[in-house]
Image (tube, rainbow, N blue to C red):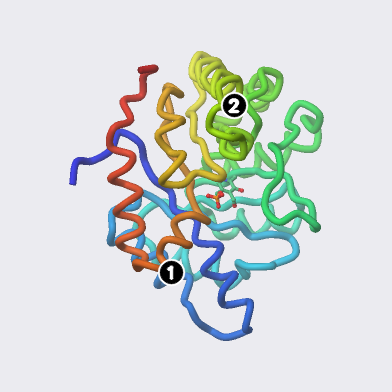
Amino acid sequence: MTEPKLKLGVNVDHVATLRQARGTDYPSVVDAALACEAAGAHGITIHLREDRRHIQDADVYAVREQIQTRLNLEMANHPAIVEIALEVRPDEVCLVPEKRAELTTEGGLDVAGNLNALLDPVRRMREAGIVVSMFIDPDPAQIQASATLGAPCIELHTGAFCDLPTDQRGPELERLVAGARQAHALGLQVNAGHGLNLDNLAGIFDVPFMHTLNIGHSIVSHAVMVGMEAAVTSMLDAMVPYTGERG
Ligand code: PXP
């Protein structure tokens, strides 16, 4: 397999969703993470939600201990979760907004409107050696605010792009392209994710400077049919044509 220019972080939250649906001790989130790594994933992403609807605290510690690649912990800026992050020391945290009623993360974090609340937790996590990323919409003010905050990385929210009918995605694609350029010019690492699947993936290949894609639901869904290693391999194969430049 050709090594893609893009890195893949697999979000295994929905392996935990399946387990929590029955209160069993299977399927194992750790085994799923290890299967992703065996297939060539560059990192594992898990979201410890305040409501603990899928990933549990014990999963975070177990995944941290067992995986060999990078751990990216998605989390809201809640004091108790920040303390867990400081104890677990993931390689990266991605700060996301969180509403209890939402099905999944809706919309990006309002960094610009919450600079004061974010300053101290971001500083503490950075001082602990954690790469801090902001999950934001491709909005110039949010990108600038992330740089002002001292976050070295952003994750552009691709959900709006993915939700649009294929023939109406142009303007959102342009926002993502402009956002990636702005972030790159500010020295930020550009990641992207949300809603990506094998059908819509190539649609974002015009977005330059992307480093890592974080993909969860579509890979776990595909894994139900073909197994985790095959699902991760197909995504990695689909990422190979990305050049990092606007085509
Ligand atoms: N990135 C972030 C910040 C997310 O919150 C999620 C969903 O947990 C993802 C990526 C992955 O999204 P999806 O499950 O739609 O691939």
Q: Earlier in the sequence, mark 2 or mark 1?
A: 2
At horizontal 50% and vertical 82% (from top left) the residue drawn is 26
Can you tell which quarter of the image residue 124 is in? top right
Query: 56 or 131: nearer the eye?
Result: 56
The residue lying toward the viewer, choosing from 111 and 104, is: 104
Splitting the image into 4 quarters, where does residue 170 fall? Answer: top right
Q: Is residue 72 left or right of residue 83?
A: left
Residue type indicated by callout 1: Val
User: In the rendering, which numbered label is found on residue 206?
Assistant: none
Up-down relation of residue 13 to residue 30 (above or below): above
In the image, is residue 64 above or below residue 130?
Answer: below
Label at residue 168: 2
Task: In the rendered structure, find residue 224 and report the number of the disc placed on it.
Answer: 1
Queried on whether the Cβ of the residue with tag 2 lies below 8 angstroms from ligand 1, the answer reads no
- Number of numbered discs visible in the structure rendering: 2
Judging depth in this view, the residue of 150 and 204 nearest the camera is 204
- The reply to whether the C-beta atoms of the residues labelled 2 and 1 are less than 8 Å apart is no
Residue 140, position in %: x, y? Answer: 66, 18
Q: Position of residue 247 (x, y in %)?
A: 35, 17
Quick check: 160 left or right of 208? right
Q: Secondary structure at mark 2?
A: helix
Residue sitting at x 19%, y 41%: 2
The residue positioned farthest toward the left in the image shown: 1
Element type where label 1 sits in the image: helix
Point 49% across, 19% down: residue: 184
- Of tags 2 and 1, the one toward the viewer is 2
Q: Residues within 10 Å of mark 2 (few under 14, many from 20)?
A: few
From mark 2 to mark 1, how far is it between C-alphas? 31 Å
Rendered position, 134 above or below 206 = below
**Image spot of residue 72 (x, y percent):** 51, 50
* Relative horizontal placement of residue 114, taking residue 66 as reference (left or right): right
Instruction: Inspect the image, locate mark 2, and give the three-letter code of the amino acid beneath it.
Output: Gln
